[in-house]
Structure formats: C-alpha cells, structure tokens
Image: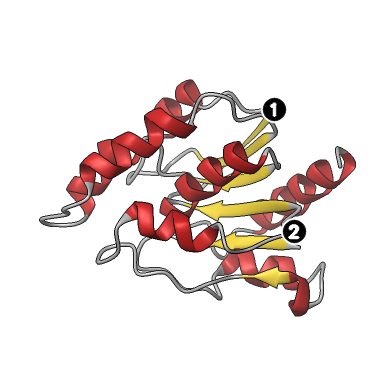
Amino acid sequence: MILNLHGLNGSAHNTNYKLLLKLYSEDIIFSPQIDYVKTSPIKILDSLKAYRNINYVVGNSFGGFFAYILSNIYQIPCLLVNPCIPPERYIPFLVEDYEFVNELAFLMSEYADNVQSVYMILGMEDHVLSPAYTEQIIKAAKVWKVHGGHSLSGNELFYQVFHAGIKEIESTM
C-alpha cells in the first residue's frame, strides 16, 4: 500500500497521485484530502496513523512534512517532492494567522531525528521553499535535483525522476 499526501491547498488527486496511477492500481494508493489550514497537525497525524500496512509514503510540499514524520514513526521509506521542512519556517508566511505553529515545531522536534529511507526530489528554482535549505536539513538517501519551481506539474524530467525514485524505493524493500 502507498500513502500519497498532497500539499497545502492541494488535491488528493495531485500530480504525484496521477503518476502513481501509471504504476499501480488505484486500490493500493491511499490519497486523502486534507484541510491543512483548519486542522491541527497533531489531529492530521493521528488520522494518518489510521492507514495500516503502508509500504511507503509519498509527500508533496506540506504533505512532504507529514510523509517525513510518518516515515520516521513507522520506519518506512518516503519520497518527498519539494517538502515543506521545517514547516514552522514556511507555513506562517504562507497561511495568514496560522494557529498551529507550535504543533509543527513540536512534531519536527519529536519525530524528525531518525528518519531512514528518505528520497527527495527538489525543484531548484522553487521560490516558495528553499531547496538548498531543505537539502541541508534532511539527510536523504538520495536527492534528485530538477529544473523547475515549487510546482513540478507538466515537467517531463520530474515525471522521469519520480518514477526512478519509486523504483529506487521498491528496490530497497
């Protein structure tokens, strides 16, 4: 089973989901719609823990933060696409009057130390999140750097790298 987590104000049927559908049947991909703005990050994490038998998790942007945390909790691989890490640095600037900054910082400090199988794709022209800063913070097993901004939708090189990342993860399982 694969868990796919979309980004802030994104869709459960995001680009990553569509790319996963090219590789797998829809019945093994869980891709919940999440309201990141109005829901406490701790409640989000608790609801995500309900998904059992996950082999790996894919996360885009803010969903990448939650994928990273779940990867640590369950010791499963994750593929992060332009992850919003650390979220307490970015989310207050992206969401006016965001009330859960302390929870983000808590989750980051509590669960971000021992993450093992992290694979990451960074758009090097991302002006929303700093790819250089993200790369310094996350100890990834492998990082792919692609041309493009925060949204890599429509980027053929990203599509190829995404598939390579999935194959890399599966080769370690």
45 to the left or right of 59 = left
Q: Which residue is mark 1?
A: 141
Q: Earlier in the sequence, mark 2 or mark 1?
A: 2
Q: Which residue is mark 2?
A: 53
51 to the left or right of 102 = right
Q: Residue at x 41, y 37 (%)?
A: 85
Quarter of the figure that contains the N terminus:
bottom right
Residue 135 position within the rendered picture, expressed as x and y whole percent measured from the top left: 50, 27
Residue type pointed to by label 2: Asn
Q: Residue at x 42, y 31 (%)?
A: 110
Residue 17 position within the rendered picture, expressed as x and y whole percent measured from the top left: 63, 69
Disc 1, SS:
loop
Q: Quadrant of residue 4?
A: bottom right
Residue 35 in sight from this viewpoint: yes
Residue 6 in sight from this viewpoint: no
Which numbered disc covers residue 115? none
Disc 2, SS:
loop
Circle 1 Cα neighbour tier, 10 Å, few/some/many (<14 / 14–19 / ≥20): few
- The CA distance from mark 2 to mark 1 is 23 Å
Q: Toward the viewer: 56 or 74?
A: 74
Residue type pointed to by label 1: Ala
Q: How many marks overall?
A: 2
Position of residue 145 relative to residue 138, above or below, is below
